[in-house]
Image: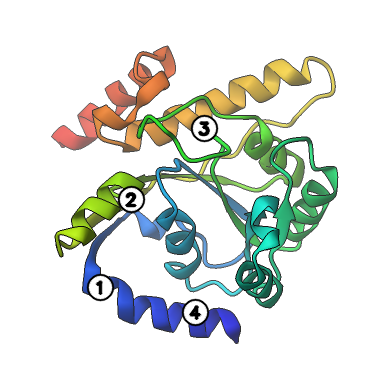
Amino acid sequence: MFLKVIRLIARLVLPLFARIDKIGFENLPKTGGALVATNHLGRLDAILGMVLSDREDVIMLVAEKYQKYAFWRWVVKNVDGIWLNRNEADFHALRLVHRRLRQGGILAIAPEGTRSQTEALIFGKPGAAYLAARANVPVIPAAISGTEDRVVKERLRRWQRLHITITLGEPLMLPPMERKERDDYLQACTDEIMCRIAALLPGHYRGVYANHPRLQELLQEQQPARAG
């Protein structure tokens, strides 16, 4: 009920200061476990991820640093969120997320682990790939643009509406994870996920993946589709 109220308020307020273009949302499964892997530009990203989906089984991860604020403790409690210690391997949080993914929940997560200070992609961490592979759920690559904290502040200060674009790519099933050479497996899967996110973004957002060979392959594959 609380999530429905938050969504209702947000959907009434957001159009007042932002135009949001949603592309590829048919790729978002209506039921069943799934992991949405997205880039992370600003504080607004988390709110968008929570309110734009109609699903009730959203898994909300919140950095432990916000636990000191009464407001965020109240929000996390009411949305059945999970606190995450980003400074170390938080196995307790990972177990909770894994269980809820297996039960059919949907998780939005930024493999980068933090907001990009360069306003472009930084190197992804293996947590998203690990969770998706272990829970055997599809990864939905997602690209957000227009939510940079700097841009949000500047435009709102000038009473200008934001222009936010959210693009979802096709679902990706990762190959089974084997115990041998697990680190190499997770790195390869993380690169695949990050390159798929990069392929959905305008060029100046691609950051450290701009010259990645896999990204170049994906962009080549997109060209015939766009031409057709």
Q: Which mark is residue 193?
A: 3
Gap between marks 4 and 2 measured at Cα: 20 Å
Label 4 CA crowd tier, 10 Å (few <14, some 14–19, many 20+): some
Under circle 3, the secondary element is helix
Q: Which mark is residue 114?
A: none
Under circle 2, the secondary element is loop
Gap between marks 3 and 4 measured at Cα: 30 Å
* Above or below: residue 79 compared with residue 42: below
In the rendering, at what x and y percent does residue 216 appear?
34, 17
In the rendering, at what x and y percent does residue 24 appear?
34, 53
Along the line of sight, the residue nearer the viewer: 9 or 225:
9
Q: Which mark is residue 15?
A: 1
* Above or below: residue 168 compared with residue 19: above
Gap between marks 2 and 1 measured at Cα: 14 Å
- What colour scheme has been applied to the protein in the rendered image? rainbow
* First along the sequence among labels 1 and 4: 4
Q: Which residue is mark 4?
A: 6
Under circle 4, the secondary element is helix
Q: Which residue is mark 2?
A: 147
Gap between marks 3 and 2 measured at Cα: 21 Å
Instruction: Tell me which amino acid carries mark 4.
Output: Ile
Q: Name which quarter of the figure residue 60 lies in.
A: bottom right
Q: Quadrant of the N terminus?
A: bottom right
Under circle 1, the secondary element is helix
* First along the sequence among labels 3 and 2: 2
User: Of circles 1 and 3, which is in front?
Assistant: 1
Q: Is residue 30 left or right of residue 60?
A: left
Label 2 CA crowd tier, 10 Å (few <14, some 14–19, many 20+): many
In the rendering, at what x and y percent does residue 210 appear?
34, 19
